[in-house]
Amino acid sequence: MTAEEPLLQATNLHTWFELRQWGFLRVGSVRAVDGVDFELGRGESVAFVGESGCGKSSLARTLLGLHNPSHGDVIFEGQHLSELKGEARRQYLARVGYVQQDPFGALPPFMDVRRLLSEPLIIHGVKDRDERERRICQALQEVRLTQVDEILPKFPHMLSGGQQQRVVIARALLLEPAMLIADEPVSMLDASVRVEILNLLRRIQTERGLTLAFITHDLSTVRHYADRIFVMYAGRVVEQAPVEQLLDNPQHPYTRALLAAIADVDADNALDERDVPDGEPPSLLHPPEGCRFHPRCPQAMAGLCDRQDPPLFEPEAGHYSACWLQDPERD
Amino acid sequence: MNRWVQGLRELRGYPSAVGGLAIILFLVALSLYTVITIPYSEALDRWRGGDHWQMNPVNAGPVWADRLLGGNLPQTRVVESDNADVREAPFEGGKQVRIPLTFEYDNEGFPSELNLFLNQKGTQQEAFVRLTWHTPSGETIPLGGQRVSEEDRISISQNRALEGRLGMVPHVGLFAGGSDPADPRAERGDYRLTVDAMLFDPGAELEADLAVYGRVHGLAGTDYQRRNLMLALMWGTPVALAFGLLAAVGTTITTLVIAATGVWYRGWVDALIQRLTEVNMILPMLPILVMVGTLYSTSIWLMLGVVIALGIFSAGIKTYRAMLLPIREAPYIEAARAYGAGNARIILRYMIPRILPVLIPTFVTLIPTFVFLEASLAVLGLGDPELPTWGKVLNDAQEQSALYNGFYYWVVAPAVLLMLTGLGFAMFGFALDRVFNPRLRTQ
């Protein structure tokens, strides 16, 4: 962690979606993000990892201002996101770029590349056409789409998946963001272009000194592209640590299970039994009492894990884990 | 945008698109020609009726229809004194004028009416005229004499005394050449009407124009007020197209924007829009229009306004809503929000353009329904009181029992134009549907 002020800070962040019957009767809430605290430094690359439905995409959307937090807040460059209105909010949106999972869906199919890249600039008041053209070309160069004149008049369906994702990244870079949020940026791409796109993101991140937040379910790729990892489970961050520490010395049983599930390229181990927990992620409508992982946890301690919510323990410096196993006062 | 260019290029492969477009272009060209050659105020003024049409026959059919069926019915001809060999003989305090009005008649059947228009210049004094009719066979029929004022019309057809002497209406009797009154046949040859006038002022001049009204007239015929139907048929085109287009544009755009707004905001906005639509869907449009027309005004612009107002919350909202709901959740809209697009921009620039290609065909086929609606209102007597339109022609025809009297042209022409409009837009619309609606694509 850097000593300077963090770029982004999430404090006790909750994003709940209310379920209503007949439009007004509240029948419950889906707790997609349920009490998350973290700090992201400038120029840092972090990964949020978890199964589908663990709330990582909801977290991304909350950081992007697409969902309003139900409790807690996001503090970006010292400003509280929930207090930003109108122009200030727009400025915030310009400071955070968004790269989506489905590159084709992320591009309006009825706009050509020139038009769809002009849109963010127009919205943010770049009125001069030449200025827009210049910035668009610059962004396209930066994502290595060097045949600018060929790309600009094309419609999204005329581009390959990799090109589409590069255009999406170029669009996210156009407004000179301080932070990029990439929600599973390569999971819908062809295996052959995944590494290219990940390298591209990493290179842009280091060149520009951006904060990059990856959302992914794939622990195998994060080692090379992230500095820190947050493991999420059922709306909470259960473990966070610098990438080497977390991958080499996982503390939380859930993290261990995730790491165990990574495909092993060694053919000798193909038939080995893996220590993968049974069951499914819990209902976010009625999360289990105590530790949310305890129904699936092989090391669950009756009377503790199913009663009390574990706080974040720090078994080693910079390595946090929300598990009673790491309680230094245990035994 | 090149998707549109591509679509239009593809249209050439559909005969119905080419045919429909040809019909639409013809109607548009006709509209432009009409509006340029007959200005709006002039069209209204003429359609009001009056002297402008006095040289036209009453209820005459179109010439081409008669000729096509091998007929040879007379067209209106006007014999003017300017071309006649006028003889003048002065006397004290005035002069005697003899105007021979000669014309050749070689048509089947008889004229529909005979009128003599007299115009005396340079005096306030009444003149006295005596008329004599000379048939080709040399027969001379005196038509009597009378005083005439400065500008006068002698209606020979209405001369009861003459009718009594001839035993037939004058415009038949004078041309019958002594044939059987039960089955008169027109005598062909040179006729002459001699006008002998006594003018009681030496400086006076007399002009005499004999109108021999025909039984066929022009391309479209005339109506009971001698008005040339061509005027209404031509002016009906821009009126119908403008009404159809404005109503279609007005209802489609408002409906689309409202549906998209409801889908985007959801919650009570959407609920309100849906309930309003459901209420509006059970309101009967025609009776409301009839009521508005009866109580307020039948001005076409008021009707257009009411049609659009009633069309805003139409069933289309339900269809558009169903199409827009999945689009609302599209990732590109989420991306647009993430880079700061406002609500209005998302609705107008991101949601609506997505379904526009699918709506263009519906829009095109919607135009004639409003054209028909305007015509139906006119037929019900709720047409614009001043504008000549196809519906008004049909309404007049109905009121004058055109079909009972055998004036088919009066009903057929506007009906054909209406059907042509419907056909053109429908053919074009269906072809557009095939091009722009991916579900109907065959390949």
Image: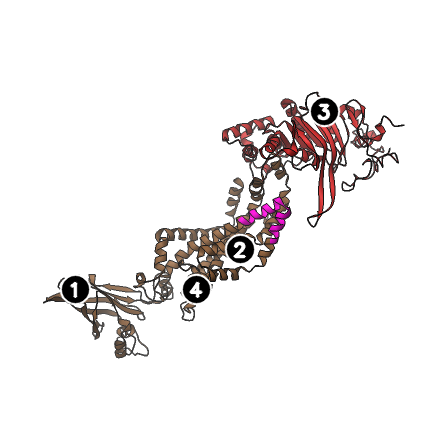
Chain colours: A red, B brown
Mark 2 → mark 4, Cα distance in angstroms = 25 Å
The residue under label 3 is which amino acid type? Answer: Asp
Q: Are marks 3 and 4 on the same chain?
A: no
Mark 2 → mark 3, Cα distance in angstroms = 61 Å
Q: Give the percent coordinates (x, y) of residue B131.
A: 20, 71
Mark 1 → mark 4, Cα distance in angstroms = 47 Å
The disc, 2 or 4, on the residue closer to the chain's N-terminal end is: 2
Q: Chain of mark 4?
A: B
Mark 3 → mark 1, Cα distance in angstroms = 116 Å
Residue B261: in magenta span? yes
Residue tagged by mark 1? B86
Residue B283 vs residue B318, the one in the foreground:
B283
From the viewer's perspective, tell me whether residue B344 is left or right of residue A280. left
Q: Chain of mark 2?
A: B
The residue under label 4 is which amino acid type? Answer: Asn
Q: Magenta region's main secondary structure? A: helix
Q: Are marks 2 and 3 on the same chain?
A: no
Q: Residues within 10 Å of mark 2 (few under 14, many from 20)?
A: some
Tell me where residue B217 sits by quadrant. bottom left
Label 4 sits on a secondary structure element that is: helix
Q: Give the percent coordinates (x, y) of residue B362.
A: 54, 51
From the viewer's perspective, tell me whether residue B224 is left or right of residue B357. left
Residue A190: in magenta span? no
Residue tagged by mark 3? A227
The magenta region covers: B254-275
Residue tagged by mark 2? B310
| Closer to viewer: mark 2 or mark 3 | 2
